Image (cartoon, rainbow, N blue to C red):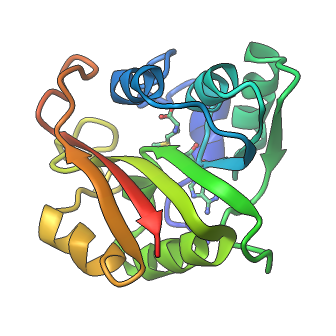
Amino acid sequence: MCDHFDWEKCYQEKTARWDKGAPVPALVDWLTESAARGGSVAVPGCGHGHEAAAVARAWPKAEVAGIDLSETGIEGARDNYPLANLRFEVGDFFAGSAEGDLTAIIEHTCFCAIPPQHRKLYRDTCVRRLERGGLLVAVFYLNPIETEDDPDDGPPWGASVPELDAYFGEHFDVILSKVPSRAFPGREMRELLRVLRKK
Ligand SMILES: C[S@@+](CC[C@H](N)C(=O)[O-])C[C@H]1O[C@@H](n2cnc3c(N)ncnc32)[C@H](O)[C@@H]1O
């Protein structure tokens, strides 16, 4: 899965330019404004773990798991964030057969890292893993600059609002959908924070 792009090499060579060294402001703000939750939470494509750690700190009763394909990325995450309710796993988020085991999936720049032909698999994995009423909280990338992270036609791949509606609408209610007021420099007006609740 996702062999199109060598994530591990980027982490090894320290060319992971998408890594801003901090959790995405949209998620930080949402966590501050929202009630804390418990249960099992997954953060797919967690990279160096910034968003997973933000969730673990904001939701101390939750058991948070960051998952990423890259061993080097996960090693960095473990070094960065040794928190009691947070673990990091090397793995493919789309693998396995677990069903209904998660209360929330929270992600930043994972959907946009998946080749567009695999987006249904992403959606189906979220549907399979979330319990009824579980949340998918995602900072989607609407219109990335193609050359920002990779000049060779690689990720990030943007998505339009109608596309997101088409992928997720059948299985999720939209609880919140907004262009965040704060973003990393250069990403202003390019992100969409969506909170989706599984039907
Ligand atoms: C653009 S990076 C974002 C990393 C992190 N969320 C951040 O914002 O710094 C995308 C991440 O998704 C991971 N990834 C891609 N496909 C994956 C999969 N199928 N399962 C788990 N992680 C995956 C990559 O290894 C990479 O770390």
Occupied quadrant, residue 79: top right
Q: Quadrant of residue 120?
A: bottom left
Residue found at x 67% / y 31%: 12
Please state, as top left, top right, bottom left or bottom right, where the N terminus lies in the image.
Answer: bottom right
Q: Is residue 38 above or below residue 86?
A: below
Does residue 117 sit above or below 31 in this rendering?
Answer: below
Position of residue 24 measured from the top left corner of the image (x, y, whole percent): 40, 25
**What residue sits 55% from the left and 65% below the top?**
133
Rendering coords of residue 191 (x, y %): 22, 40
Res. 143 in view: yes
The percent coordinates of residue 36 (x first, y second) are 59, 31
Q: Is residue 13 visible?
A: no
Residue 135 % position (x, y) = 51, 56
Residue 8 or residue 60, whichever sits in front: 60
Q: For this rendering, which residue is in front, 161 or 2?
A: 161
- Say which residue appears at 64% left-offset and 38% top-offset: 37
